[in-house]
Image: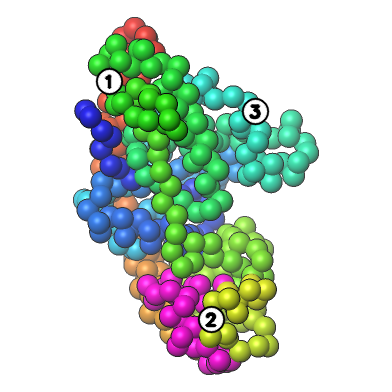
Amino acid sequence: MTEFKPLVFSGIQPTGNLHLGNYLGAIRKFVALQAEDRDCIYCVVDLHALTAQLVHDDMPTQIRSITAAFLASGIDPRKSIVFNQSAVPQHAELAWIFNCVARIGWMERMTQFKDKTGGKNAEQVSLGLLAYPSLMAADIMVYRATHVPVGEDQKQHLELARDIAQKFNIDFGAHIRKQGLGVDITVGEEPVHAYFPMVEPLIGGPAPRVMSLKDGTKKMSKSDPSDLSRINLTDDADAIAKKIRKAKTDPDALPSEVAGLAGRPEAANLVGIYAALSDSTREKVLEQFGGQQFSAFKPALVELAVNVLSPIGEEMRRLLDAPEHIDAVLRDGGARAREIAEKTMTDVRDIIGFVR
C-alpha cells in the first residue's frame, strides 16, 4: 500500500434525545459524505455513554433511537456501515494499547475534561472520563479512518488522536517496517513510516455550532432542562413551530450583511439555522430577509424547518415501532465493522510482538 485509503468515520453517543444541533452539526454531514460515494462508517458510541452515566435503564432504546435517526435522515446501511460500538470489541482492545501510548498530561489538558470536572474534584471522576479521548482515537484508528466530520468542540480530541497515532507510528516504526506494513508519510518536515494515518477533521457549514433557542450564547443541548431550548428530531410539526415562534430574539430588524449579526447571538443563530436547513449561506439569507423584522422571518423559518424536519421525525417514529429492522441493521453493520477492525488488530498485534 502506497497511501491510506480514504475512509470517513464518526459516531454519536446514545444519551438523551437527538436535536437540531446534532442533525445540522453531524448527521446531515454524514448523509452528504455518503452521497459523495466515500467509504463511510457511522457508529453509535455506546461505550462512551458510560462515561456520562454508568447505569442506563433505557440503553437499548437510546441505541435504537440514534440508529433510527441515522436511517430516517438518509444514511443507507447498504452503502455505509452502521453499528453500535460495543458490538466490536476491537475498539476497547486498541483503546488499551493507546492508553499505554498516550500520556496522562495529554488527557488532563483536554478542555472538555476540565469543563466536566469543573476544574476541581478531578480525583472523584471516573478513569473512563479521563481516558475518553483515547477510546475516541481507537474508534477512528481501528478502521484507519482518514477523515472525521466533527464540531468545533471535538476538534481538540481529534488533534489528540493524531498525537496518539503519531507516537505509535514513531515508537513502533521499525516494527511496522519489519512487518511490511504501513505507508511513508511526512509529519511536519519529518518522514515517518506510519501504520496509522494522520486523520483530518471535516468542519464547516453555515451552522456548524447550533445554539440554544432560549440563549444564543449557549450551545443547543439535550441536557438543557428547558425543552423549548432545542428542537428534537422526534418533534412533530406543531412542536417545531411552537419552539421557533417562542425562540428568543432581539427588537431590531435583521441586517442586510453578516457583519451586522455581530453582538446579536440569537439573530445569528436563527439565520444560521435557516441557511443550513435551506442549503444556503447566511449571506444569501440576509439578502432575502435583511431589513425585515423577526415577525416576518420566523414564519418562513417555521415553514422551512417543518418541511425538512417533520418527515425525519415521522420516519424515526415508524422505525422505532419496528425495532427488529433497526436491530438487523446493527447486526449486519457490526459484522462488517468487526471484519475491518480485526484486520487492523491482527496487524497491531504483530507490530507490537504479541504471540498468536
Q: Amino acid at mark 2?
A: Glu
The quadrant where residue 204 appears: bottom left
Residue under the image location 53 percent in, 19 percent down = 100
How far is the residue under mark 1 from the one under mark 3? 30 Å
Q: Nearer the viewer, mark 2 or mark 1?
A: 2
Characterize the local packing of mark 3: few (<14), some (14-19) or many (20 or more) Cα atoms within 10 angstroms.
Answer: few
Of the residues under marks 2 and 1, which one precedes in the sequence? 1
In this picture, residue 87 sits left or right of residue 289: left
- Is the C-beta separation of discs 2 and 3 under 8 Å? no
Amino acid beneath label 1: Leu
Residue range in magenta is 269-298
Residue 106 showing in the rendered view: yes
Residue holding disc 3: 105
Q: Is 67 placed above or below 206 here?
A: above
What is the tally of numbered marks visible in this picture?
Answer: 3
Instruction: Sort mark 2 into few (<14), some (14-19) or many (20+) by Cα contacts within 10 Å.
Output: some
Label 1's element?
loop
Q: Can residue 300 be seen in the rendering of this structure? A: no
Q: For residue 214, which numbered disc appears in the image?
A: none
Q: Which mark is residue 181?
A: 1
Say left or right for 9 vs 95.
left
Quarter of the figure with residue 140: top left
How far is the residue under mark 2 from the one under mark 1?
Answer: 53 Å
Q: In the rendered structure, which disc, 1 or 3, sits on the residue that comes first in sequence?
A: 3
Identify the amino acid type marked 3.
Gly
Q: Tell me if mark 1 has few (under 14), some (14-19) or many (20+) residues whose alpha carbon lies within 10 angstroms of its own.
A: some
Specify the quadrant of the image occupied by residue 184. top left
What x and y, as percent, mark residue 355? 34, 7
Q: Is 81 contained in the magenta span? A: no
